[in-house]
Each structure stands twice: as C-alpha cells, then as structure tokens.
Image (cartoon, rainbow, N blue to C red):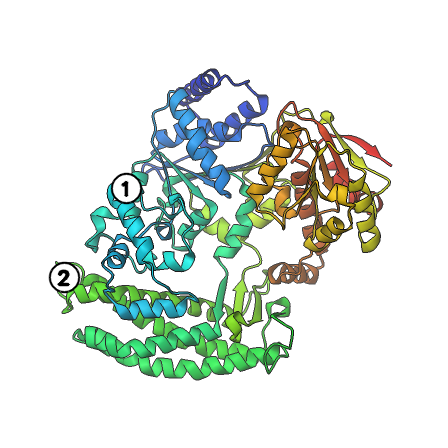
Amino acid sequence: MLDSTLKEEIQTAYRNVVEGLDLTPRYSQRLMIAEIARTLGDIQSDDDGKRVNDTHVCVLEAGTGTGKTLAYLLAALPIAKARGKRLVVSTATVALQEQVLNQDLPALAKHSGIAFRYALAKGRGRYVCVARLDQALEGTEVNPTLSLFEQSLQEKGGDVGELATQLGEAYGSGEWEGDRDTWPQTIEDHQWRRLTVDHRQCTGRRCGHFGACAFFRARREMESADVIVANHDLVLADLALGGGAILPDPADCIYIFDEGHHLPDKALSHFAYRFAVTAGLRWLQMLKGSLTDLNQALAVQPTVARLLATLPELINGLEPLLGDVFRVGHEIAERPNGLHEGETRWQQRFENGRIPEALREQAGQLLVMFAELSRNLETISDILRESLDPDKATGLDREQAESWLPLVALVHGRALDAHALWQAFSETDPVDAPPRARWLDLTRPAGEAELVFSASPVSAAHTLAKNLWGRCHGAVVTSATLTALGRFERIQERAGLANRYRYQSLPSPFDYSKALLSIPAEAMDPSDREGHERAIVKFVASLDKNEAVLVLFSSRAQLRAVEKALPATIRERVLAQDALPKRELIERHRAAVDRNAGSVIFGLASFAEGIDLPGRYLTHVVITRLPFAVPDDPVGATLAEWIESQGGNPFMRISVPDASIKLVQACGRLIRKESDSGRITLLDRRVLTRRYGQALLEALPPFRREIA
C-alpha cells in the first residue's frame, strides 16, 4: 500500500504542475494518477527489492485530452525513486517520444518540485562508431576484407569519405553528439552501415576509442537517469537479447507503455525470423573467399586455426543443401523455373504452419550445420575479444584481433539468424497452442532470383507474459484505444496480460454531443464496389467548399479512383496522401484553412491515427468504409485457421474487435480539444444491416446520431 509520505508527494507535485502550467484539473487525469499509484504502491518486495506479488500491472484506456503523460509521470516517478527502480517510458511513435522528452519532462522538472534526471535511450546502431569514422577519415581500411564483405551484403556500396569528414568535424567540435537522428541531413542506409556497428561487432571497453564513444557516452547519461525515454522497438530488442543488455534489467524497471495498443504487433516483428537463400549463399561464398586472409592473420592462435580449418567443409556442405532447398521452395510455390512473366513477387504460405516433410528434413540438416557454424564463429569471436584484454594472453596480437573481430562478428550474426529460421522450420508445433506462421516469398531484387523463408509466432502473448510482465517490477499500459467493443479481452489476448491485473477505462473530458455521427442515404454496402465509389464521389462533390475535411479510405486503389472521378473544381481542393509527403500535406491543408479556403485530405489507414488537426483545421471526418482488415498476411491467416480449427469464428474474434478499435481511432481525429465540434460521416451501410453493426456503434463515444 502507498504510504502517506509518497501519497503527499504525488498530490503536492500534481498541484504544483497544475498551478505552474495554468492547467484545468481534470477528473480523468486525477483518476489515472490514483489508479497508477494504487497499482505500483501495492507492489510487494523482499529485502533485496525483488517483487514478490503478481498484481503489478495496470492497463488504462484514457482518451485524448486526459493528460496521460503528466498523469503517469506524476504517479510513477516518486514511487520508482522511492523503490530504487528506473522509470522507462516507452512510446510507439517518434512524435510522442519527442513530446515526452522535449515538453512533458522539462515541464515536470520545472514545476513539480520532484528532483530527477532523464535521458533518451537508443540502440547502438543509431550512433556513429568512432573507430569506423576514424578509419573513413584516414581514407584507409583497417580491414579491406571487411569492407568488401559488407559491400557485397549491401546492394549499394560507395565512398563515405566526404560524409565522414563532415561528421568527424561536427563530432570533434561538439556540435554533433554522434546520433544519426540529430544530423540535419538524411544519411543513406548504405552509408550509415559503414560508420556504425552492432552489439556483436562492438568491442566495448576494450576499444581504443571507448572514451570518445558516442553510444557509451549516451549510455553513461542513461545509467544516472531516473527516467529513461525509449520506444517499444528498443524495449523489445532488449528483451530479445535477454533483458538488461541495452536498458536496465527488467526487474529493476517500472515500464510505462504509452500507445500501448501497438505493443503486440511490435513484439511479433521482433520474434520473427527470415532467411534469404541467394543472399545466404553470397555471404557464405564471401566467407570462403576470405579464409586465406583470415588464416594468415589469425591462425597463429591454435584454437582459432583449428576452427578456421572446419569452415571449408561446413561451407561446402551448406552450399548444395541451400541449392536443394532453393529448388524445393520453387517447386512448392509451383514456380520451378522461377517467377512467371510479369510477376515481381509470389508468396506461398503453409496452411496451419505445416510444411512438407521433405522440406522439414532439409531444415533439420541446415539447422545442424548452421548450429556448428554459429558455435565455431562464436568461439573465434570470444577469443578475438579476449585478445583485446591486455591481462589475457591468447597468442593473438591485439591489432589483428581488433581488425578481424567486426568481420567474424558480422558473419556470426548471419549464421545465428539462419539457425533461428531453420530451427523454426524444423520444429513441430505443440498441439494445444497456435502454430507458427511459415511461408516463403519468391522475389527478383536487382534482377536476381531470390527465395526467402520466413517464420513468425502468430501471437506475442506468451513471449510478453514470460519476458516482460513476468520479469518487470511494475508496468502501466495506456492508450486512447485499448478496448475493443468496449472490452479489454482483445488486448489481453494479444499482449499476454493476465486477468488479475488492474483494468480501467477512464471517462473522457470531452463533450461528445458536440459531434454528429451521420450515416447518410448515400451510404452503401462496399460489396458493390462501383456503386460504393460513385456514392463516395457524389458525397465528396456535395461538401461545402469551405469545409476542412479528412476522407479516410481503406485502399489506395479506391482513393485514386474516387479522386480521378471528381469534378475538376472539387479535385483542386483535394490533398491526396499518396501524392504528397505527410508533413507537406498537413502544412498545405493548414495553410488553406488559414486563408479560409476549403481543403479535403484523402488519407489511408495511417491517417486514422496520429493526425492532430484541432479546431477549425478539421470539422468533418468521412469514413468511406468500416476498417475491416482481411487476415491475408501469413501471420493473420495462420491465426485465423487455428481459431477456426478450434471451433471459433475468426471474423468475430479478430476482424470485428480490430475494426472496432480502428473505427474509434478514425472517429477520434475529430475531437482533439474540449472546444472542438463537427461531423463524422460513415459511408458504409453494413453498420446498419449486419449483426455486428450495433456492437460497433455502441463502442463509439456518445456522439449525436443522424441516420438516413
């Protein structure tokens, strides 16, 4: 239970912030603070500070206008400091991350009366490697073989000398902190890869440039911070590495997941695997071609010499196996001679995740060989790292070890990725749980035939339950849209959140009666595609010429068809998402509204979330059709098959709840402030004619309604 001292500290800090920022106290914000404080305050710990109870997570749906960020910071920060834990605030988007870092935390530090430090956490790959930068500035490659190897793995190579000079001068003078995201111009991926390293290639404290390292400088700031601002990808990457590799150990963290509805999908992508056969053969051949140089440089060390001697046989065994699996994959896809004329890509999903026995046997053979390759390369990497330590005598020269470690680590990473994929293809799924999704893609990048094998869990629930919720000291999951059809079951199912956790949907501070939800006579069933498009064209053409409108489409093809069919006088007011960058489109829209001219944005699904056009910048949202996502991607389709095999209805269990969330998000574009008002028009009559329609309508905020 929260003690009186902490309770008073939170209440005082809240009063200070409200007065300092001249805010209007909101019931939903105070309720959110209370819910978080109650959950985190009830966490029980042993003498070592380790959590011993399992009701340490709260899930809070809080709409726009609640003041979520200040609420969770004010509630969680004093408790985290008192318990000796770190507060990790994780967002899904850069925009919210920048808001927390540049607005909310400075405001809290200035007005709350709480003394704290905060820092931004980013992965190693976002920072320049000073050793690599130094090499590029000198114009000499410490290891030419590595440079050639990396260029062969990338479709582009090219000189980075001019860029390195600019980066080096700015970094040396202190004008730039080595962070890719803060460089004023875009740095192309193929250039940046030459100037950074991953966690396997980095030599850490043993590097001669450690004192000037941008990543470790930022890491030192993070280690002294009470609040760490991160993103979902970085948190999940840390968990994938075992936890505590990038961020503090989960047991020492209280996490805040803002925009928490994105977490399950982000988690799926982090625990999916892929292997491109042609690219794999290429790096194996490059490794074979590098063996002479590797032996000349490293074979003076007996263990390294022995392991290097195993590589030719391993590579010679892998090459024909990969050739066979390339042929079998094409046969399975019924493309034995490659893609048909006119095809650029073909995807073949394995129903219920079950692959043919012949392919499973091949996967098992590849698994064994890539496991051996990974072990041997890992041992060589370990010896090279030990050789950087002056207190350890390995028989290898430090300079040689430092020069060759990046290459060995690079190939080791590739071998581990291959091992993970073939393990996923050789394993048998448990009968009482959803299977993995497994599929292959035939492509032709740069005119060269490629076959990519992929595998992914269909649910992140088990992974998150075990590696995140089960390990952290405490957590808050919040978003404006966490419920589906008014219930939390969907996010629980997808994110592995237990029933025993605390769930609360907080009341909105907005008066939704200021908005009108209209289903006009023009609304049609989208199954009549041409008739539906004509109805959209007719409706858009009838809009008031001075309106600020957002029209949301579910497909790019329909967006283009409607835009093309509009009268020229209407079309000149339309700003289409696929014709302009998002930022420029928003700026043009605002400029048109500022000069009292009408503006109509045509947007796709991404414009249904995250677009903030308050007041007169948006007075009418038009939703052309209910946002049902067809589960035709391999992961969604495999999950749907499994649900069906268990006697369930995937449409009602997945599609309708997900559509409910997206519909709420789309409608949420209209009311962004307490003074906002306007109209939402839904041009899909299925909401009135299908049995799920009433449930979708009931899950929306209490708008006034007008149904024709």
- Residue occupying image coordinates x 33% and y 34%: 84
Vertical placement of residue 457 versus 184, above or below: below
| Residue highlighted by disc 1 | 220
Give the number of the mark in front: 1 or 2.
1
Position of the C terminus by quadrant = top right
Q: Which mark, by number, is residue 392?
A: 2
Please give left or right for residue 642 compared with residue 178 in the image.
right
Position of the N terminus by quadrant = top left
Vertical placement of residue 84 versus 394, above or below: above
Packing grade of label 1 (10 A; few <14, some 14-19, many >=20) is few
Identify the image quadrant of residue 208.
bottom left
Vertical placement of residue 616 versus 658, above or below: above
Number of on-image labels = 2
Query: Where does residue 522 sit, x and y in percent of width and height?
Result: 85, 42
User: What secondary structure is found at the residue carrying circle 2?
Assistant: loop
- Residue occupying image coordinates x 17% and y 73%: 301
Q: Give the mark, 1 or 2, whose residue is nearer the N terminus.
A: 1
Residue closer to the observer: 348 or 2: 348
Query: Where does residue 134 sit, x and y in percent of width and height?
Result: 24, 55
Residue closer to the observer: 646 or 118: 118
Packing grade of label 2 (10 A; few <14, some 14-19, many >=20) is few
- Residue occupying image coordinates x 48% and y 74%: 277
Q: Is residue 41 visible?
A: no
Query: Where does residue 97 sit, x and y in percent of width and height?
Result: 46, 38
Q: Is residue 559 visible?
A: yes
Residue closer to the observer: 506 or 209: 209
